[in-house]
Image: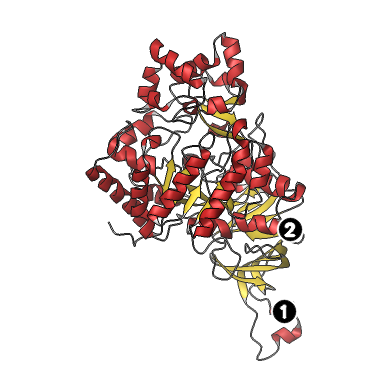
Amino acid sequence: MRITQVPFAICITLPLAACAAGSAAPALHDLVIRGGTIYDGSGGAAAVGDVAIDGDKVVSVGPAARGRTEIDATGLAVAPGFINTHSWATESLIVDGRGLGDLKQGVTLEVMGEGWTMGPLNEKMKQLQAARLGDVKYDITWTSLGEYLAGLEKSGISPNVASFVGASTVRIHELGEDDVDPTPEQLKRMQALVRSAMNEGALGVGSALIYAPGSFAETAELVALMQAAGPCGGRYISHMRSEGDSILQAVDELIDIARQSKAPAIIYHLKQAGKDNWDTLDPVIAKVEAAQKEGLDITATMYTYPAGATGLDAAMPLWVQAGGEEAWIQRLKDPAIRAKVAAEMKAPGKGWENLYYQAGTPDGLLLLGFKSEKLKPLTGKTLGEVARERGKSPEETAMDLVVEDGSRVGTAYFLMSEANVAKQTTLPWMSYGSDADAPATEGVFLKSSTHPRAYGNIPRLLGKYVRDEKTISLSQAVRQLTSFSAQQLGIEGRGRLAPGYYADVVVFDPATIADKATFDKPHQYSVGVRDVFVNGQQVLKNGEPTAARPGRFVKGPGAGKCPA
């Protein structure tokens, strides 16, 4: 990369005609990214040219005048910064504001909000959250979601941040973690919490319906929350009630919520979990596209791997988890309850999503993270391996690990078909979310393993699927990572390289961009992204982070406008 600092007195370096008497001096921009192949986010054909930036905005795309700073992007792609539409960087950005795992993928906006969010919190929720912290420790100094996001901005972060408000969080705030239905008065208070979050800048409501206590919410409750968020420009985004045996019914529920609330709806990390369900992709696509023809705004996100990652809670029935993590762990100490749980783990889930069964074998569950130092040596082993080492059944072993660790135990589940992942990349209504934090290959993050999507979700799309398998063109992939994602989320002013848009920019090499992280060795950065700019400031230079922390709290359309 060649960076040129251009002096103010530029006339002597220009052709004589440009400095002739009466001629206006050419514009001198703060920054010009020169000579790259520009993918402007529209999905149209790329063109070689320059991107000129003044302050935090793009001012021109095409041939540009001089810049106080100039960056040579010859032979490289220049695109709007990529949007991670499903991020779990909620904790990692508190302890490391660089967000390196995502920054080196070209991510300039982290969008959070799957079910649980960092607000609104009450005192009991703060105490429980503090008690349940794993390797990443922090003080909870905020109460509302807006206060948390504003606090990230104030602390100094490289990427921008945005969030939905969690339906589970709102439910816990008013109802706790039991399997109960809200009274009319409680539901009104839950709606008020949603409107307050929308007024602060939330993008909408996010649900996670396979996990307790979010799973205890019935459709009518979710519709009511969206009836509070929808008039404020809110979207509904959901980890649906099923991604496996009942996926078609789950899609119907999401579409019904969109129809009743008159709000757009987005399927979080679309997948077909379990080999017996791999043939449901086409019927799911048909349902979504039929709803689109009806006039409903239904879209999806995905990650580019055949395994998901969650906890061992997704291997056990919901009834045993009612009341919260502590109540669940206590129940697992009862021999009669353990016997009942083990029996249910071995069969398809009835009224719950049994990822243990869908993985097909206990060796399809990879243990990623423990709180206990004593158990950390098990990291990277499969549940089957640990069960054989202990001489117990895998079901008993799973329950033992939860009790011994005092946590849900981070776990990857191998559930999906590579062919379906590839086919999903061809869908024009798909955006890309890692469903992971934004870690670094150092410090506290090395105390646990992780899913490789934390380091490679986007480069895997651009390398494996765009360049190598050609499932989608580079121009279209950039569109879906940028302007489509912004439109999908209701975010204005980002996702394009066009005058007036915020200057979130990524410079990368289409020939070399690739993910390096694997399930065996996940803590590896991707390659091929050279430079990243956020709000006009360079946060990645020659593949390495700078000291700049220009990230902002990006607010939804209801900010300051949603009535209480």
Q: Residue placed at 53% from the left, 33% from the top? A: 245
Above or below residue 436? Residue 467 is below
Nearer to me, 452 or 356: 356
Query: What's the mark number on residue 12?
Result: 1
Amino acid at dot 1: Ile
**Quarter in which the C terminus is drawn:** bottom left
Q: Residue furthest left?
A: 185
- Which residue does the image show at 41% across and 27% down from the upper left? 318
The residue closer to the viewer here, 450 or 531, is: 450
Instruction: Compare residues 310 and 428 and report the one nearer the observer.
Output: 428
Q: Can the viewer see residue 157 in this picture?
A: no
Residue 140 percent across, percent down from the top left: 37, 39
- Distance between mark 2 and mark 1 Cα atoms: 30 Å
- Quarter of image, res 351: top left
Residue at the extreme bottom: 22
Asked if residue 39 can be seen in this view, the reply is yes
Where does the N terminus fall, quadrant-wise? bottom right
Query: Dot 2 corresponds to which residue?
Result: 76
Q: Residue at x 55, y 16 (%)?
A: 394
Query: Which sits in the foreground, 104 or 466?
Result: 466
Specify few, some or many for label 1: CA neighbours under 10 Å numbering under 14, 14-19, or 20 or more. Answer: few
Q: Earlier in the sequence, mark 2 or mark 1?
A: 1
Q: Position of residue 322 (x, y in %)?
A: 36, 27
**Quarter-of-image position of residue 53:** bottom right
Q: Is residue 112 above or below residue 397?
A: below
Left or right, 120 with respect to 250, comes to: left
Residue 346, position in %: x, y? 52, 19
How packed mark 2 is, by other alpha carbons closer than 10 Å (few <14, some 14-19, many 20 or more), is many
SS assignment at label 2: loop
- Dot 2 amino acid type: Leu
| In this picture, residue 5 sits left or right of residue 377 | right
